[in-house]
Amino acid sequence: MSLKDGRRLLWRHLAPQRVALLRLTAWSALEALPTFFSGLLVAGALDRGFLAGRPLVGFGWLAALAALWVAGAFGTRQVFPWLAAVVEPLRDSLVTVVITASLRRALRDQDTDGGSSITQATVQVESVRALVATLLRTTRQLLASVVAAIAGLAVLSPLLALVVGGFAVLAVLVFMVLLRTLVDRDRRAVLCEERITAVASPLVEGMRDVVVSAAEGRAAQQVGRAIDAQAEASRAYALADALRLPVVTLGAHLPLLALLALSPWLLARGQLGAGQIVGAVVYLVTVLQPAIQVLVNAGGTVLVNLGVILARLAEVSAERPPAPPAPRWTLPGHHLAAEHVTFAYSAHAEPVIRDLTLDLPEGIHLAVVGPSGVGKSTLANLLARLATPQRGELRLGGQPLDDVGDRYLRRTIALIPQEAYVFAGTVRDNLAYLRPTATDTELRRAVAAVGLEETITLLGGYRAEIAPGGGGLSPGERQLIALARTYLSPAAVIILDEATCHLDPVAEARAEQAFAERHGTLVVVAHRISSAMRADRILVMDGADAVLGSHRELLATSSLYADLVGYWDSTASERVTEATA
Amino acid sequence: MATKLTTTLTQFGGSDASADAHRASGNRLLWRTLVQARIRAGLLVAVALLGIATTVLLPAVLAAVIDAALAGHAITHALLRLAVVLAVATAVSALDDLIGSYLGIAVTARLRHRLFGHALALGVPGQRRFPAGDLLSRLAINADSPSNFLPLLLSAGTTSLTAIGGVVGLALIDWRLAATFLLGVPPAVALVHRFIATAGESFSRYQQLLSSVVTRLLDALRGVRTIRASGTADQEIARILRPLRDLRATGREVWMAQGEATWRMSLLAPVIQVLVLSVGGYALTTGDITPGELVASAAYATMALGSVGLLNAFVALLGCQVGAARVAEVLDEQPEVSPPSVPIPVPPGPGRLEFNNVTVRVDERVVLDHLDLSVPPGASVAIVGRSGAGKSVLVSLIGRLLDPAEGTVALDGVPVSRMELAALRRTVTYAFDRPALVGATVHDMIAYSRPEVSRAEVEAAAAAAQADRFIRLLPDGYQTLLRHAPMSGGELQRLGLARAIVADARVIVLDDATSSLDTATEVKIVDALGGILARRTSLVVAHRAATAARADLVAWLDRGRIRVLAPHARLWADPSYRAVFAADWDPEIDWAGSDGVLEAVAET
């Protein structure tokens, strides 16, 4: 996490709003006008008015001050539209960058546990909006106050202005040093807090295993250590915060004391009148001192938070440039073949698929069966080029799969995973996702084929809106939508990866039948063994090895297949028990 | 500030009986945390009082210096007094923050320890009530809110006292000054009211739009595989960001509303100041007050105007309450499985299990219904039944992952509910179909139930579970960190089995623990386990006929009871028994019996 990256990110997204920023500054100047003159006008009211026994003149000066405050309020009113014009586009562009980067990263890494960190990032963009707005207003306030106080003092007495100015500069320098330490310690505290979740999460999710192993004490200790470390880091931050003492002392109190100490000498020399002394003190007490307090309290917090958040956002939105698009091809056919394909999750792992050779002529209906976790989804991914084998080759229409153009490939091979994707939009949007130019007739035909009509009527027709989060549809209904969508698409090879697991057996049979009758190749990763019965050919994945055959052939040759089918040969087992007896 | 106000108010808006009860419990929790940290709390109060004193004194001391200077008297003493008050004020303010922070940090840490410990006590039944994500957010975020309670309370108190002090100070100088100031209070209150009324709607719409962007993104993340397979990434990004247009318009409304309130407030405050100064100036002319007192009155007026900050404090206190209520909700939950009041040690014995009249209800549904089962010691029993029959629930009772609503489960004659809990859990071990990755390294995971065990024992168990080979392929072998070793379902199950072997327990429960293994591996494991299981009692939740066939006896769980306890071969003649194994087919058809599709079962 680097502060510099964070700053650069902010500047990149703030720069397009330069004009609005200028307008904002102009109106802010008007807003600050009364502060400039407050001390002067009060001094005038006292010296020329009340102290001189002319109350009406005094009222006049104060009335002028009131008029200035009205002008200032008008300035405040005009500031906010420009504030919006700066901050809203900033939020928009940051959100766009964060979401684009997050989605692309998830697509690349297939790592979806970043869900919580992504919601965090979006919340953080929102914080940036609020913080930048606060920063803009606070900076204006501060600048105006300090400049006003010093300018006003300069009018009253250049010497005073110089002295106070010097102290103010010192205070700001000390503050900058303090800020560095604060950011470092805040960052450490934030990391420690995240560590608590990181340590607690596997223990909470694996609660069953913890309880069964009588390991509650150890688990509590582990998390306890993370909790204590975070407390320690927070305390370190709180301690650093106490360093504000010198800043306030330097910036506010010492100038005041200095002014008062010098006042008898200044009065005696006739350099300053009583009213001017009072005016100067008014500047210091009502303008400069609160400004320094604001700088140290709110300003410090805002800057520290902003610094840490921007650094994290810079991390999240760091994006590798996209890969150059592959050449376009149209292929003579859709014959899909795998040759001696071997796949393992990493260089250190045993292969999940070993030396698989598979030939899928156009139009074939293949079922893939095997125990859960054996690698059926991995095979589906390889066929759809969502994963690359370590050894061996996959070919589509005679061409190596890697050389096929991305757009063509995605249109030709369709994969439906178990988790059906239904998004916020109309029913039609969801159904026509893979074929936006579909006509109503084609839509209705697809819906009828997979048995979705009833659900669509219940939802309220094709123009009905589905809410984000799936809109109250059952998992089965969502799968039907995904099935209808893929039926409608132009795909020539369709891979169903347990895509009917939430349907009852009858609905599942109907959907699979529809796809089998549709043109093209069908590969079904079976959820129920009955899918195997409907296929032309069955691939049984037994560990990293695989056996291909028809239902009858496999019953005889594969004990795993027989077991999965629920077939048990009591005679075989009797023979075994006899032999071991 | 305003956003927090609206979101907190909307959270508080929904009032039903349980929400009220939680809030009350949350408040009790807040006060309890204070009592526990009473020394620090007391110190904080003392420091805060000192702070008020210095703030109120300051204008008066300042006035004294000015008057002395203007009158030409020696100012040294007055100046010294001023310097001391300023120094004390600064020190007090820093101490105030430091003690407040330390107090808050201690409160949060204590709450987090308690919360996690209680989550562990709630155990497996607790996970249904508080799923993992929910619990973790309470631990990380909600446990932090109560930490600000006392500092906020004090800050609100201080602001109020200071404001009152300011008004009193004004009154002490001249009653007319106080009266002028108080004229400004009704317009200020009216302003805040109007702001909340008009801005509230824009704020909540803004929050809704923002959260709809987040929901769309989360949806897309769940469908990431489809998006990858369909190549529609750009389309998706455009769709997710569609609410941004409305968001910008609503955001602008929010700023405009804030602007309206701010400019009015920014006019009100200085106008009041000017009015006070005018009245003071007039009083100066008539000789009722001194110039120093005029300056003091400007300072007192500023102090009194600080009461605007009370609104922030109020909003923040509401936030505290909400967080505390969410923590209290977990702490108030009674654990379903608790250790016995007078624990008995686990009796020695061969491992006989008796289920007597056991009834278990899950979410008002009766899963086990007056169930009786007798497992002979040393036997291996397969638990068989349709999915959803309650097989996992049944075996969970032995190790007290759950407790029955009625009836008893006894191990070697003693009810498990009366045994010392940790000892029971060492006597009964489980292997699951999806073991959790607990422990830091692979070695830790396998040795999790007996951390003192040697590497040699761990390796022996891993070898028996056919896991040794793939573990050695990992970058650091047994020392590999679990998060650096992605594993397939089958490899994970093998680790789980190794863990169960290491536990060296009297009773072993295999809950679908070999479902992801390929035939070859399963055969080897069964061979290796054969020796280990021979002397122990084992229960195997079985979905496949071959697994049931290997066991000594099969307990057929049907409609909440054990229908029969007999060897698999004898039961296979019954078509409805056969149907259990082919249960994910069309349940009407007896596949194993119909001809033309499967070979007929040989006559037994």
Image (cartoon, coloured by chain):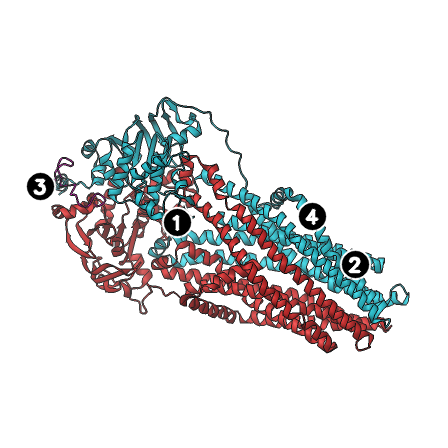
Chain colours: A cyan, B red
Q: Position of residue A66 (x, y in %)?
A: 75, 63
Chain bearing mark 1 = A
Q: CA distance from mark 4 to mark 3?
A: 94 Å
Tell me the amino acid under the disc marked 3.
Glu
> How far apart, in angstroms, are the residues tagged by discs 2 and 1?
64 Å
Q: What amino acid is labelled 1 in the image? A: Gly
Residue B256 in the image, given as x and y percentages of width and height: 61, 55
Pointer 3: what residue?
B603
State the residue position of label 2: A164
First of labels 2, 1 by sequence position = 2
Local secondary structure at mark 4: helix
Marks 1 and 3 sit apart, C-alpha to C-alpha, by: 54 Å
Q: In the rendered structure, which amino acid carries the disc numbered 4?
A: Arg
Q: Residue at x 60, y 60 (%)?
A: A238
Labels 2 and 1 in the same subunit: yes
Label 4 vs 2, first from the N-terminus: 4
Are dots 1 and 3 on a single chain?
A: no
Q: Chain of mark 3?
A: B
How far separated are the C-alphas under marks 4 and 1? 44 Å
Q: Name the one closer to the observer, A12 or B29.
A: A12
Which residue has dot 1 on it? A471
Q: Between label 1 and label 3, give the one nearer the viewer.
A: 1
Mark 4 or mark 3, which is nearer to you?
4
